[in-house]
Image: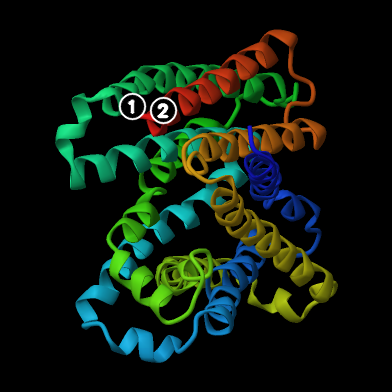
Amino acid sequence: MSHRFLLGMVIIFISGSLNGSFAFPMKHSRHWKWENTWLIFTTFSLLLIPWLLAWEFVPHLAALYATFPIRVLLIPMVFGFLWGLAQASFGVGIQMVGMALAFAVVSGLSCVSGSLAPLLAVSSRELFNPRGLLLLGSIPILLISLVLYAIAGKRREKEQAEPSSASVHSRFMPGLAICIFTGILGSAWNLGFAFSGSILQQATASGASAVTATYAVWALVLTAGYIPNLIYCVFRLGQNKTSRLFIGHGAVREAGLGLAMAVLWLSGIVGYGIGASIAGQYGTSVGFTLFIAAQILASNLLGVLTGEWKSTSASTRRYLLAAVLGTLLTVSVLNLGGLF
């Protein structure tokens, strides 16, 4: 096993851990509401930083875009907009069910839908080859995992309810539904890249490296994804009258938390691209499995450490562990297809 492969895997594991930890700073918010922090996070991660990277590392970016008809540029942006809907709902899902469950459910479903959608769209005949059969085999494992998450979440909700409460107002099942929606739609950016080969080729021809050429597509996909996030955050700001918090007490600290989220999230995405390139042949198969696994493990560890499963029974935590292991098995079986 080459040193480059091992180095690539280490970078990917660290990147997945960073990406799985991006929501952690939001737990330390004291003065802002969800919409305030999420708007700062998405403004930096989906708009400002991607364009800074694209302008800095892709030579002649404006001229590059000008060489394509508008239809070619719109394709990644349409998929980016769909992904942006999922990104906004992901933030709501984290708020409702916690970081641990949200990441595990969304990561598992995105992994399956992100592999299934391009396969059906580009080469449906591959569905009955080894790669496609592994994909189909991973789906029932994931469905069983989702049932286990639902059981664990409902038990947690009941066990953490105040003893004085006459009834428990359920947030878990709606939150789980939001996470399932997010996971299914959350792979739309993958299709955006699948249909952006000509942009990547032209960026490479203009002098960008194989890694930095992707910034030309990232800028389009993420900017389109920013639009639904912006609309939803502005709606919440108006509905809850929380825009005044941007200039209120502790605003600088709260904005720093949103920026920290953006740095963690983008560092994970960019780091994965670097690690996969260094790892070579299996960077996008074995490497992607490791990236998703690191996301799930990091988010669940932080969820436990920050008290998301405090005051729950050992039996409930066993359901959670079984669900996490099932999700990791799903990702592993699915990405074995990269070896064929």
Residue 253: horizontal and vertical position, in percent? 83, 70
Q: Mark 2 points at which residue?
A: 334
At which x and y percent is residue 255?
75, 71
Q: How crowded is mark 1: few (under 14 residues within 10 Å), some or many (20 or more)?
A: many
Q: Which structural element holds mark 1?
A: helix
Classify 230 as above or below 112.
below
Q: In this view, does 84 lie to the left or right of 321?
A: left
Give the residue displayed 39% in from the left and 77% down from the top: 205
Residue found at the very far left of the displayed protein: 125
Which quadrant is the C terminus positioned in? top left
Q: In which quarter of the image is residue 151?
A: top right
Label 2: element kind = helix
Residue in view at x 42 percent, y 17 percent = 141
Q: Residue furthest top?
A: 315
Tell me: 190 left or right of 248.
left
- Say if residue 311 shows up in the picture: yes
Residue 155 lies in quadrant:
top right
Q: What residue type is labelled 1?
A: Leu
Query: Cβ–Cβ below 8 Å for labels 2 and 1?
Result: yes
Res 175 visible: no
Q: Which part of the image, by quadrant, shows the N terminus? A: top right
First in sequence: mark 2 vs mark 1: 1
Q: Which one is in front, 328 or 130? A: 130
Q: Relative to 193, is 241 above or below?
A: below
| Residue wearing tag 1 | 135
